[in-house]
Amino acid sequence: MCHSIGMKVITNERLKENYIQKCGITDWLPASLYSELKLYRYKKGEFICQEGRIIEQLFVQVHGKSKVTRSMNNGKEMLTSFNSGFSMLGHLEFFTHNPAFNNVEVIEDTFCLGLYLSESTRAVLLQDVRFLQYMAIDLSKMIIKENQNSAINLVYPVRQRVASYILCTQNKGYFKDNYTHLAEYLGCSHRQLLRVLNSFVQEGMIAVHEKGYHILQENKLRMIAAELYSK
């Protein structure tokens, strides 16, 4: 399945209905399927989708943050995008019937609405014009976002990439990550990454903290970051 063991089903119907209305799902999801939606909560570090695993649900991230990575043939992982707030997950696999193409890892507590894709549910969705139109537009936006983020890794220096990543993944002024994996995501060496982080500390923009790094001067980081990774 396309969710981690640690996720939790939330049975608060009022909260689920609030997310359904707030995120505009009623604009494109057939009304007959509303009752089949389930609300899930994921904690930081859990996976909504894992590369190569079969996707049994269509997910809508309705609150929180997640990052999308993809494994390469050389064994390394590439960062492709971030999801912040409302984001569709699993629609590419819905149309291709393939296992998950990417890993989607939660970087702060996140809520998702999930729709189990039974044969009857697939049939309803594939016959609904509003749903198909929405999917086409959203897939186009996803491709544009991933292309923009790939360009950042190809064109901009490590210093700018690190600043952008910190700003996208920070949580209430703090930043922490697996720095070995982060170096792979950003296409640099572990030594280069640590050198940049140390330079940010020396320049007073961040400080070493038990939570990882504490962001002291966000405006200066934004000046360094040529472009933020698209959310």
Image (cartoon, helix red, strand yellow):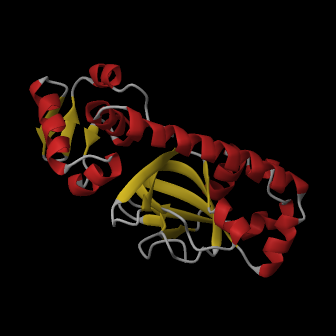
Q: Is residue 175 left or right of residue 42?
A: left
In the foreground, 225 or 123: 225
Q: Is residue 176 left or right of residue 5?
A: left
What percent of the width, then of the height, locates residue 25?
Answer: 74, 51
In the foreground, 37 or 221: 221
Q: Is residue 212 left or right of residue 42?
A: left
Q: Is residue 26 left or right of residue 85?
A: right
Which quarter of the picture shows residue 116? bottom right
What percent of the width, then of the height, locates residue 99?
Answer: 58, 74
Is residue 164 visible in the rendered structure shown here? Answer: yes
Query: Residue at coordinates 76% horizontally, 67% vertically from top-left?
Result: 35
Is residue 107 visible in the rendered structure shown here? Answer: no
Report the label total. Answer: 0
Above or below for 28 versus 115:
above
Q: Quadrant of the N terminus?
A: bottom right
Query: Residue at coordinates 85% horizontally, 73% vertically from top-left?
Result: 123
Above or below for 210 versus 4:
above
Above or below for 122 versus 220:
below
What percent of the width, then of the height, locates residue 137?
Answer: 75, 45
In the foreground, 17 or 111: 111
Which quarter of the picture shows residue 144? top right
Query: Residue at coordinates 47% horizontally, 43% vertically from top-left?
Result: 150
What percent of the width, then of the height, locates residue 94?
Answer: 70, 67
